[in-house]
Amino acid sequence: MANFNLNINGKKQQIDLDPTTPMLWVLRDHFKLVGTKYGCGISQCGACTIHLGDNAVRSCQLPVSAVGEQAITTIEGLSENGDHPVQKAWLEEDVYQCGYCQAGQIMNASAFLKSNPNPTDEQIETAMNGNICRCGTYTRIKKAIKKAAAHIENI
């Protein structure tokens, strides 16, 4: 067991646990931030995507010991009222079907748009390639990302 000081969604949190514990379970089991989903457990589906600093990372394979002092943002911390441009575009484009993968999709898309505010269709497809949507809403995801990019000054 080890003690960790974490910055989760702008709040300082302290926890004592096994250093190999994946951040997914730290977030879900210890801090009750259940928007981050378990999908595959091997970093292949993207349902567990969070931000570590400004980067989208898979939390299912990220040990708490690797986080250090970097800021962690979950879907719950992306915006206070669900009004982040990517979240708003998701609703406007009616992206959701079952919704299970969508938190990871949104987290990946928002980090992508921070680094590429005016993406091409091909760049969007490449960036989002690792996030699997079993309902197949990829066309709507791409449209939502393009719509959010038009409001990039708010990201």
Image (cartoon, grey):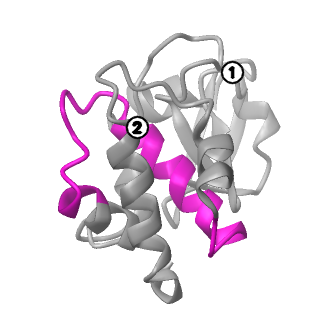
Q: Nearer the viewer, mark 1 or mark 2?
A: 2
Helix, strand or loop at disc 2? Answer: helix
Q: Earlier in the sequence, mark 1 or mark 2?
A: 1
Position of residue 110 measured from the top left corner of the image (x, y, whole percent)? 53, 60
Q: Write the residue at 74% across / 57% down.
A: 70
Q: On screen, 34 above or below 51?
A: above
The residue most toward the bottom is: 153
Q: Which of the 4 image quarters holds residue 44?
A: top right
Q: Nearer the viewer, residue 124 or 52?
A: 124
Span of residues in magenta: 90-119
What number is the disc on residue 138? Answer: 2
Q: Which of the 4 image quarters holds residue 150?
A: bottom left
Q: Write the residue at 24% across / 33% down.
A: 99
5 displayed left or right of 37: right
Q: On the image, numbered disc 1 is attached to which residue?
A: 61
Q: Are marks 1 and 2 in contact (CB under 8 Å)?
A: no
Does 101 lie within the magenta span? yes
Q: On screen, 83 above or below 132?
A: below
